[in-house]
Amino acid sequence: MYKEDNLDNLSFEDLQEYAKTLGLDLSKVDLDSITLPPDQSLPADSEFIIQSDDEKWLNDFSNVIIVDNLPMVGPAKFKKLENYIRNIYDKIKTGMIKEDGFFMPVNPETQKTLGYCFIEFNTPQEAELAKQKTNNYDLDNDQKYILSVNLMDEFDRLIHVADEWMPEPEEIPCISQENLQQWLTDKQARDQFLVINGSNVEIYWNDHRLLKPEFIYSSEIADCVQWSPHGTYLAIADKKGVFLQGGATAFHPLVLCDHAQVKLFDFSPGEKYLVTYSIDGTSSPNDKQRALLRIFDTRSGKMLRGFKRILDDLATCGTQVPWPLIRWDGGKYDKYFATIGRNFLIVHEAKSFLAKVEEIPMKIMDVQDFSWSPSDPIIAVFIPGLHGKDDPARVILIHVQSRRELRKKELFNISSCRMHWHADGDYLAIQVDHQKKTGKGNHYAFLIFCIKERDIPVEVLTLEDDNDQIVDFAWEPKGHRFAVIHGDQTMPNITFYSIKNTSNKSKVLKLKTLEGKQANTLHWSPAGRFIVLAGMKDFAGRFEFYDADELKTIAMAEHYLATDIQWDPTGRYVVTSVCCINEFENGFIIWSFLGKILCRIQKEDLNQFSWRPRPPSLLAAKEEQKLLNILIEISKKYVAEEHDTKKSLKEQEQEQRKILIKEWQAWLAKWRQLREEEKKFFSEQQIEEEEEGDVTDEEETNEALEVDIEQVLDVKEVVVY
């Protein structure tokens, strides 16, 4: 039955059966008394290990849990209890139980269960999740059977408890660190900004009272610098990786995300994760270049996942690789992210970093572009028509969490498509370029998806002249308006629209068109209402500050050769800058939101200017509006007080002027009286001289002289900056 040459490959049970055929009972054999011939020896321990099935099973316990405090039932209820426990883990979707992964021991004497069971999952992550969700679970809702769930790898620690008491290790004292949001509590409500000047990064307070920035920090940089989306971290990349620094003024290093030779990096919207990108330098010259992507936890600096992809597969158009390669959902929880390649889109769940969203992988083919909603787990994808004119392009809205298609719009004869989400996620504007039937030229339109309304209706917006080329489009951040630059690029028009919800239906309304403006970009204030119509590049830095509520221009301004413009996070200030890509006029200007210059700073090697972002408000939109209404009511009191103060000061000034006028009139009357007395005196003297005789030649040369007398009425000292 067994060949002698194959005995080494037999299991322990097969060896027992083979021993029985020889009339041997292995349980009674003293293995220590066995001796081998001189020319043979026992195999090493790593080569010859005899284990029973139970022992082999216990050695692989990373994906096994122990469920304790179960009812002790007999054979009649055994299967019912097993199915009940399986249903619990199926409902909470912790993972798949292996086919033979359920074992509930039975007392051989009473044939009743022992009150616990072993459950084996496919992965250790599923076992950990099962433990977290079912530990302290009330089995029958009467507090009688509350489950105690532990991982199998904790079994050794639980059963091997020392006989003698051992003192707990001495606690390490907690060292208080600087509050990373301390800068938000500035008493003067100032904002910070950074300036990269040559190889140095400099950080300043924006102090409008001093009419110049206040310097607070400086350091050298190796490659690139970037604020995190909420302004918590200052990320600086060098050869070792990306250092995350934080604070209000000191900016101490917090963690290092280890990734050598980083070329680009990007934060998730909620600042939980950092994505770094570099080129793999270990591949041979004949191999295709590969991109190395790593995802780090920003709090610990631990790498959570790494990708290695061929650059050609990541390029969506030509050889250009789009950045960021990983795009996160717009919600504050950083729950999902998506990667796009040449012809596919895959959505991942950030929690695991191992599996796609839920159980079903989400892979959409032939995707040319996509965009996340800023507020919800909704993704908009654009799939172009690939099979001629009869194959339409499609814009699809998908709810990622529920895997449900919310809306689909088919478009014919489309040459390009751009997506513009409203900051609150209420609207999505799709800018489409239609090819004319003649094949010469395009005409342009907008499709506006009303996301919050039932069935997501679509409003079609066509310009008065649909041949006008679209130069720029921008939503008002906290409002219902948007602006479009269209027409001739040398002197385009700017049109303002409003989309309001009336009678549970949104409708686009035209507000005003500004004709022949020297502008090619739109920059709304983060607080809404105010917008800067900026003329960059060919327009050499012309700016128009515009009030969308009053629909009128506030100020016209110019910053020669300006390359960039940024609003501060509060909407109080605007900065225009000239970077060192231009040889002249490098530096920046800080303006008020009304278009008044506050300060002008020259920087010869200015590379970058960026405001420190502020975190989003913790209040809901209704609470913010309620608070705003309260502030408006409170402000009326201070406006009235200011009006009374100004009126009182004006009255005091008028009284002072009256006093000065009276003093002047009194002095003038006194002077005139003296003048009359002088005239009378000289006239009487002349009469006397005529009566006495002829006037001499010397006396004829004497003439009356008018003398101007100056008197200081008031002195005021004014400091001129």
Image (spheres, rainbow, N blue to C red):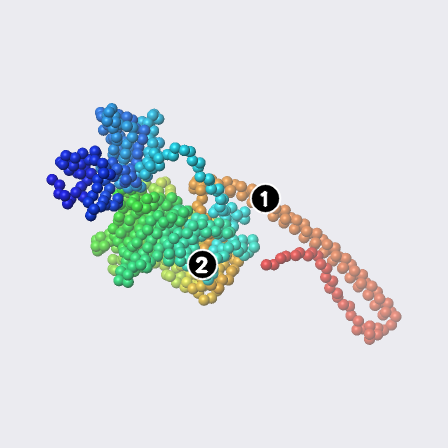
The residue drawn where x is 28% and y is 40% is 59
The residue drawn where x is 75% and y is 57% is 667
Mark number, residue 444 = none
Apparent side of residue 454 relative to residue 641 in the rendered image (left or right): left
Q: Which comes sooner in the sequence, label 1 or label 2? A: 2
Q: Is residue 217 above or below residue 159?
A: below
What x and y, as percent, mark residue 22? 14, 36
What is the number of callouts on the image?
A: 2
365 or 489: which is nearer to us? 365
Q: Secondary structure at mark 1?
A: helix
Q: Which residue is mark 1?
A: 641
What x and y, as percent, mark residue 137? 34, 31
Q: CA distance from mark 1 to mark 2?
A: 51 Å
Q: Quadrant of the C terminus?
A: bottom right
621 or 463: which is nearer to us? 621
Apparent side of residue 328 relative to residue 387 in the rendered image (left or right): right
The residue drawn where x is 31% and y is 59% is 282
The residue drawn where x is 82% and y is 65% is 682
Mark number, residue 221 = 2
Task: Check disc 1 and give the amino acid type.
Answer: Glu
What x and y, as percent, mark residue 67? 30, 32
Q: Secondary structure at mark 2?
A: loop
645 or 574: which is nearer to us? 574
Task: Check disc 2 and give the amino acid type.
Answer: Ile
What x and y, as percent, mark residue 666? 74, 55
